[in-house]
Image: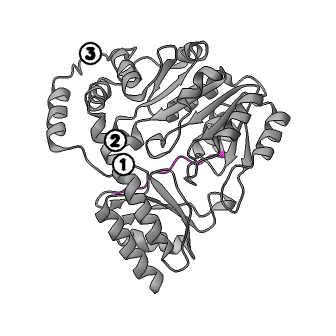
């Protein structure tokens, strides 16, 4: 009988499964979630709606109600199509599966969202990462354009703002990419709620542009709903690869209800943007800590000894993201989700204590 090592593709054998650490009982500042719960009255209405959901039946396969709700709350034009995914990860996978002709390539920047590279491996595509500028993680547009010209990728991913660095690339640079890319350019706006700009209004200008978003960072991470917006010619082809019933009935019911109260989520994200500034200023005062400006709901910072500080915070029941060793540019870097004022205060107090020792 053959072993898994004999049958599984070598590039899959070489991968490590995506690790999600346990966080029960901890101040959880590692995954860029919205730390604010829904108001009590909205939670009660949500409980009633979910209690009446027909979980004995398959969900609406087209998710038509959710798509219309997204159009009205996100300002998506009627001449653009929407593809829904079980989070953005499924959408990235669908894109790669659709474009994975023999020899097809994906280009992105590094460091950026790790799933671009992982899913390229899943689908047998070659991945090319173009380094950001080391001093400030800004986009090296000339290097990126040269890579696109040389590699002729079927797919380009650009996170806007970028994860894990938190910064916005210049919109004019992304437009240059759209003008020269031979294939699809996906602008990943997972952190759109905390940023200053969006490429959604630019969709009519570029037939090769797809804009991807998720509701996870907005405050609905547990629902696992991502969406891709673009020209019908693209979205209708990608729809063929979406598994039936990929958006479950509870997600559909909850999303429809909560998005009717988008003002609640908008108020929470405004609070996060304000506390982000406070947290950034406080981090600047800590000895040996260099935070990088962020347009997302997290802050990347370089510290004297990232593994040691990560372990010390974990021992204090504060979970953050240790990026040290993940990429050469992220040596001794930690990533802090912007939490509630109380969570941020606990984080800062722990940092002050540990850095003073």
Q: Main secondary structure of the magenta part?
A: loop
Which residue is tagged 1?
270
Q: Specify the label residue 57 is tagged with.
A: 3
Q: Which residues are magenta?
A: 14-23
- Residue at point 63% right, 26% down? 209
Cβ atoms under marks 2 and 1 closer than 8 Å: yes
Mark 2: which secondary structure? helix
Image spot of residue 340 (x, y percent): 31, 58
Mark 1: which secondary structure? helix
Image spot of residue 321 (x, y percent): 48, 59
Mark 3: which secondary structure? loop
CA gap, disc 2 to disc 3?
33 Å
- Residue at point 72% right, 34% down? 177
- Which of 298 and 79 lies nearest the eye of the viewer? 79
CA gap, disc 2 to disc 1?
6 Å
The local crowd at label 3, few if under 14, some if 14 to 19, many if 20 or more residues have their Cα within 10 Å, is: few
Which residue is tagged 2?
266
Relative side of 204 to 81, left or right: right
The local crowd at label 1, few if under 14, some if 14 to 19, many if 20 or more residues have their Cα within 10 Å, is: few
Q: Which badge, 2 or 3, comes first in the chain's sequence?
A: 3
- Residue 247 in the magenta stretch? The answer is no
């Amino acid at each position: 009988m053959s072993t898994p090592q004999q049958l599984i593709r070598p590039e899959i054998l070489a991968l490590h499964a995506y690790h999600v650490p346990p966080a029960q009982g901890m101040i959880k500042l590692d995954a860029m979630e919205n730390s604010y719960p829904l108001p009590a009255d909205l939670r009660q209405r949500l409980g009633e709606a979910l209690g009446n959901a027909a979980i004995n039946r398959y969900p609406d396969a087209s998710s038509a109600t959710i798509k219309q709700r997204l159009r009205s709350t996100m300002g998506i034009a009627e001449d653009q199509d929407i593809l829904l995914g079980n989070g953005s990860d499924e959408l990235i996978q669908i894109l790669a599966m659709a474009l994975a002709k023999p020899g097809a390539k994906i280009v992105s920047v590094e460091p950026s969202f790790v799933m671009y590279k992982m899913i390229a491996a899943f689908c047998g595509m070659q991945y090319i990462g173009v380094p950001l500028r080391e001093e400030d993680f800004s986009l090296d547009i000339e290097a990126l354009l040269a890579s696109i010209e040389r590699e002729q990728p079927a797919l380009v991913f650009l996170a806007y703002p970028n994860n894990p660095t938190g910064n916005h690339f210049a919109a004019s640079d992304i437009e240059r990419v759209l003008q020269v890319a031979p294939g699809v350019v996906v602008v990943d706006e997972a952190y759109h709620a905390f940023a200053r700009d969006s490429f959604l209004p630019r969709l009519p200008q570029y037939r090769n542009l797809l804009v991807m978003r998720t509701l996870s960072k907005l405050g609905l991470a547990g629902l696992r709903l991502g969406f891709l917006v673009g020209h019908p010619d693209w979205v209708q082809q990608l729809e063929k690869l979406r598994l039936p019933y990929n958006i479950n009935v509870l997600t559909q019911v909850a999303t429809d209800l909560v998005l009717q109260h988008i003002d609640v989520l908008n108020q929470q994200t405004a609070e996060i943007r304000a506390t982000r500034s406070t947290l950034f200023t406080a981090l600047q005062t800590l000895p040996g800590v260099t935070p990088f400006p962020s347009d997302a709901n997290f802050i990347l910072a370089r510290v004297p000894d990232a593994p040691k500080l990560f372990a010390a915070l974990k021992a204090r029941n504060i979970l953050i993201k240790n990026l040290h060793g993940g990429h050469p540019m992220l040596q001794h870097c930690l990533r802090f989700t912007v939490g509630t004022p109380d969570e941020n205060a606990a984080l800062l107090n722990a940092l002050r204590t540990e850095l003073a020792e």
